[in-house]
Image (tube, rainbow, N blue to C red):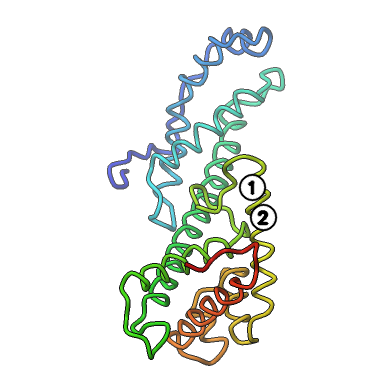
Amino acid sequence: MTSEGVTVEGPDVLPAQAPAGLWDDWTSRADEAARQQLLAHYGGFARMLAARAFANRFSRELEFDDYLQFALLGLLEAVNRFDPARGVPFEAFASRRINGAVLSGVETLSEKQAQISARSQARKDRARSLARDGAPDPHAPPDPLQRLADIAIGLALGVMLEGATVYVSGDPSDSTGTPYDRIEIAQLRARLRRLVDQLPEQERRVLHHHYYQQVPFDEIAREAGLSKGRISQIHHAALRRLRQLSADDDNVLLVT
């Protein structure tokens, strides 16, 4: 049968046994050329198992190539660990490792994509919170450049407050730069956390839930019995107050 162009072979379609000499060359003499031939010989078997898993998938977020990559990693592990002297057919030995590698890889990749999606949505909510109508001082005329600076600083604050509670590859909070840079960033985050602790209880709770525990605005709103718009307002006010507190801290420069 097929699934979106991916052929899934029947349960009885198995590859011919690899020549015993290849296994001997690999297991006895660690001949890399023999291992590559074994991987090529059983590559179709790994593809068949990947296709079955893909056909029975519960989520459609991942492509078949993702499944195939995990299956080939499982095949590599199986070839590296297989001992023909035990008398177990390679297909039986390898199928458990290939299927396990696919399931583990898909679970990890799906979780990572969910984190990326949640993080992206959270940042959109923050941007909307910071860009809502009205200047920070209702008695002052709106200044587009100052408003843009407010939004940029607010977003930068958010990145710093996120810290490293959930690692997502390519995230701005990744550990980059020199060791001294990473120490300086860690110290700045610690000082910001101390400033957060000085906020009024309601504002402090919103920042703690959203940044430290990765809870989105709508869930905070349900828990607090408030509207999502009200949580957005509290978030905006908290970041504004945090900037004001930072003006009195020589080591935290967040005011333009």
Q: Please state the horizontal and vertical placement of residue 62, each as a whole percent of the image.
A: 40, 50
Which amino acid type is marked by label 1? Arg
Report the side of 127 relative to 104 (left or right).
Answer: left
Residue 98, numbered label:
none
Q: Say above or below: 170 vs 153.
A: above
> How busy is the neighbourhood of tag 2: few (under 14 within 10 Å), some, or many (20 plus)?
some
> How busy is the neighbourhood of tag 1: few (under 14 within 10 Å), some, or many (20 plus)?
some
Q: How many marks?
A: 2
Q: Determine which quarter of the picture holds residue 12.
A: top left
- Disc 2, disc 1: CB below 8 Å? yes
Q: Nearer the viewer, residue 26 or 175?
A: 175
Q: Please state the horizontal and vertical placement of residue 216, each as a whole percent of the image.
A: 51, 74
- Residue at horizontal 71 percent and vertical 22 percent from the top: 86
Q: Please state the horizontal and vertical placement of residue 192, each as a whole percent of the image.
A: 64, 67
Q: Nearer the viewer, residue 11 or 25?
A: 25
| Residue position for label 1 | 182
Q: Secondary structure at mark 2?
A: helix
Considering every residue shown, the one lying at the far left of the view is: 5
Q: Say above or below: 156 vs 225.
A: above
Q: Secondary structure at mark 1?
A: helix
- Residue at horizontal 67 percent and vertical 69 percent from the top: 193
Distance, label 2 to label 1, CA atoms, is 6 Å
- Residue at horizontal 32 percent and vertical 43 percent from the top: 1
Q: Nearer the viewer, residue 4 or 121?
A: 121
Q: Say above or below: 131 vs 119.
A: below
Q: Please state the horizontal and vertical placement of residue 7, each as a whole percent of the image.
A: 33, 38
Q: Nearer the viewer, residue 237 or 58?
A: 237
- Residue at horizontal 44 percent and vertical 72 percent from the top: 126
Which amino acid type is marked by label 2? Ala
| Residue position for label 2 | 186
